[in-house]
Amino acid sequence: MKIQMMAALAFAGMLAGAAPVWAQGPAAASPPVAKNDYADPHAWLCKPGRADDVCGRSNQGVTIVRADGSTTAQPFKADPDAPIDCFYVYPTVSRDPGGNSTMTIEKEEISVVDQQFARFAAKCRPYAPVYRQVTLTALQAGMLGKPIPADRALAYDDVKDAWDYYLAHDNHGRGVVLIGHSQGSGILIQLVKNRIDGKPVQKQIVSVILGGARLQVPTGKDVGGDFSSIPLCHAASQTGCAINFASFRVDSPPPSNSRFGTSSAPGLQAACVNPAALGGGSGALHAYLASGTDAIVASAAPPKPWTVPPKAIDTPFVEVPGLLTAECVNDGTHAYLAITVHPDPAGQRVNEITGDIVVGKTILKDWGLHLIDMNLAMGNLVGIVGEQSKAYLAKR
């Protein structure tokens, strides 16, 4: 599936103007809810050996679209013998009617795995639990001034139980990368704080990748704050570290009301680690963008064809080498990943990307490029995981 489903759903929830679900106050007390059985394969979107595995059947084919308009299609190949694991928690996508989603796998969950996680199977064995997340329905209800009960603790507890089951039954001492976006990143921050940071299992953490979130570190430092002993990553050969970023166009930085890149307390700042240049500075983004012309329905206009004149593209994703770079920026108020588009007026490739949230004709600048955080840096992140895997195994 393409990103349009995820974009449409996230857009609907964002209209509420609410803070990210992991940053809101405590949920109202709820009656006890039965725990999920993560021994049941249907409680997982991705799990090696699971029948009808979402990652296993994801189409990750890509077409490289060069500035001169030439194209080359490339297939994708997962590595069933990958030496490490990846554990993914997906963002807010559910349109279920209650405040928390059910455990039924819907097209929304499948779509977001296609966009944000399945490609990592080239470097790691993919695990992605289903969890009873806070829904878009709950965010929309808040927008209308008619809030419905939503149990954020339930969402966290599900992921915690899935993590505990994975460690006990599937991990077998292997290294693991934690990957999340938005609500999923918020849950992972709590999971790392409560269950991993400073615990024996920390030695198995290859890295923690947190897209579209706000990881706090002491001002000018790379360890402390949310995590007491897990530093920020500065090189692909470094393991046991964290990558955190929230994307904004370089010419549309976070406004004062932005939900991302802010400090939660004096002496703290939001972390920004550039997947395109872990050591700092600017770097080329290896983006995997949705290929369809209806890919981002929440934008002011659908994206144009990728080439001029238009060429048929039969893969779900496109690569656009040379079009995008990224650099972490700290303006004293916000720390964020600034995305620059490099047009080639003489070329035959599209010179723009789509991904902003628009209400009517107004761009919601406080959300930046949140919808495509992971798409923008996907190739960089997969490459980093591959290098970290080698470094982790060498140390072991």
Image (cartoon, grey):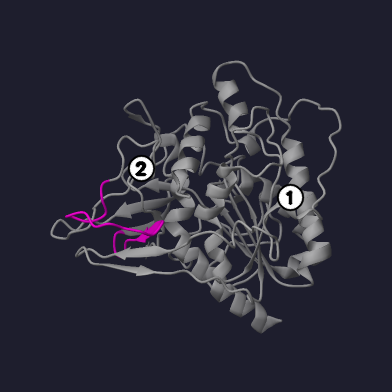
Foreground pick, 54 / 323: 54
Q: Residue at x 55, y 65 (%)?
A: 120
Per the rendered image, the range of residues in magenta is 304-323
| 10 shown above or below 384 | above
Please, what secondary structure does the residue beneath circle 1 have? helix
Question: Is residue 377 found left or right of 314 in the rendered image?
Answer: right
Image position, residue 163 (x, y; %): 76, 56
Given the image, on which type of amino acid does mark 1 rest?
Ala
Q: Is residue 333 visible?
A: no
Q: Residue furthest top?
A: 145
Q: Is residue 163 visible?
A: yes
Q: Residue at x 66, y 72 (%)?
A: 84
Image position, residue 190 (x, y; %): 71, 48
Please, what secondary structure does the residue beneath circle 2 have? loop
Secondary structure mostly seen in magenta is loop
Q: Residue furthest bottom?
A: 394
